[in-house]
């Protein structure tokens, strides 16, 4: 996958639901999370493995190059070993590990992965869904540089924090900021948690904008009707692209003229702004090609 691959929308798909996995082939989410964990009842864990393996081994091309992560059950369950054994024979792009709270949790995961023989090394993603994970995230990312991404489990965090029902996410504000700050310090992709009200499009819009303004790369979703709004919010706007073009043009012109200072619309332009602008434009090109 390109370093500019967009991660605007990540839709959870229950691994035991064959119809849902088939439906995903026609959806415009940037990536899919095939779930073996929360979305699958204990009696359907084996079916989820079989269906996911079938899709990833034989039908992955039908997803038009979209990134697919597979969320396993946590390592302290009776299902985790078989989940990982199943995935070593698949083409999953990444594995999402839930309930990672401490460095020792990641040590166990790395040990188990090292004992398996994957067709290709998968990306390693972890859920940040416990207070301990929030507090230990810096140590985890410092010790394990092969972690590609973080997915925030806001529902589990709210439960562990014993938060009352609230319209805003005020009770999660510290955790959301801390996870984002720590992840970006280690250059790790970071996805915001889910919005639970499927029918509330205005609420989704507000929460997606909040996540983007905090610095999140995208948002996890629980229903296909949440994809379009999320993709729009986390995509570069026309104004952002126009400004990026102006910044690049002004900077190149200043270099040709050997000018020491460059400004655009009254704002100072430095090399870091040019790099941000180039990344934004490349990201938009990939989004357009995916469409």
Image (cartoon, rainbow, N blue to C red):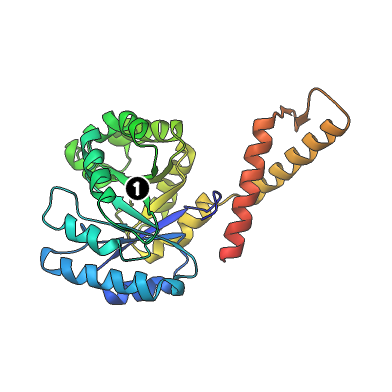
Q: Is residue 96 left or right of residue 202?
A: left
Near-viewer residue (125 or 57):
57
Which residue corresponds to mark 1? 125
For this rendering, which residue is in front, 5 or 75? 75
Q: Position of residue 241 (x, y in %)?
A: 67, 48
Q: Is residue 30 left or right of residue 285?
A: left
Task: Please tell me which residue lies in front, 271 or 222.
Answer: 271
Q: Dividing the image into 4 quarters, which one contains the C terminus?
A: bottom right
| Camera-side residue of 119 and 285 | 119
The image position of residue 280, as x and y in percent, is 62, 46
Residue reaching furthest to the top: 260
- Disc 1 secondary structure class: strand
- The residue drawn where x is 61% and y is 64% is 289
Task: Give the image location of residue 63, x and y in percent.
Answer: 45, 70
Residue occupying the point 73% across, 38% down = 247
Q: Position of residue 226 (x, y in %)?
A: 40, 60
Q: Is residue 136 above or below residue 26?
A: above
Crowding at mark 1 (Cα within 10 Å: few <14, some 14-19, many 20+): many
């Amino acid at each position: 996958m390109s370093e500019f691959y967009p991660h605007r929308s990540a839709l959870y798909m229950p691994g035991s639901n064959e119809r849902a996995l088939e439906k995903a082939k026609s959806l415009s989410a940037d990536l899919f999370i095939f779930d073996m964990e929360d979305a699958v009842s204990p009696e359907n864990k084996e079916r989820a493995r079989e269906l996911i393996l079938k899709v990833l081994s034989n039908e992955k091309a039908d997803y038009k190059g979209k990134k697919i992560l597979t969320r396993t059950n946590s390592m302290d369950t009776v299902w985790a070993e078989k989940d990982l054994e199943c995935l070593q024979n698949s083409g999953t792009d990444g594995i999402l590990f839930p309930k990672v709270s401490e460095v020792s949790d990641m040590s166990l995961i790395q040990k188990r992965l090292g004992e398996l023989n994957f067709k290709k090394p998968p990306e390693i993603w972890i859920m940040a869904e416990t207070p301990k994970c929030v507090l230990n995230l810096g140590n985890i990312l410092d010790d394990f540089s092969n972690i590609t991404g973080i997915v925030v489990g806001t529902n589990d965090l709210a439960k562990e924090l014993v938060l009352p029902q609230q319209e805003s996410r005020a009770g999660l504000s510290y955790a959301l900021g801390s996870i984002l700050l720590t992840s970006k310090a280690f250059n790790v992709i970071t996805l915001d948690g889910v919005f639970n009200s499927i029918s509330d499009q205005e609420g989704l819009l507000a929460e997606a904008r909040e996540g983007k303004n905090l610095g999140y790369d995208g948002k996890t979703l629980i229903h296909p009707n949440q994809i379009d709004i999320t993709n729009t919010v986390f995509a570069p706007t026309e104004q952002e692209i126009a400004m990026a073009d102006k910044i690049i043009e002004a900077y190149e012109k200043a270099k040709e003229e050997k000018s020491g200072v460059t400004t655009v619309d009254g704002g100072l332009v430095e090399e870091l702004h040019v790099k941000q602008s180039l990344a934004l434009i490349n990201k938009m090109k990939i989004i357009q090609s995916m469409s």
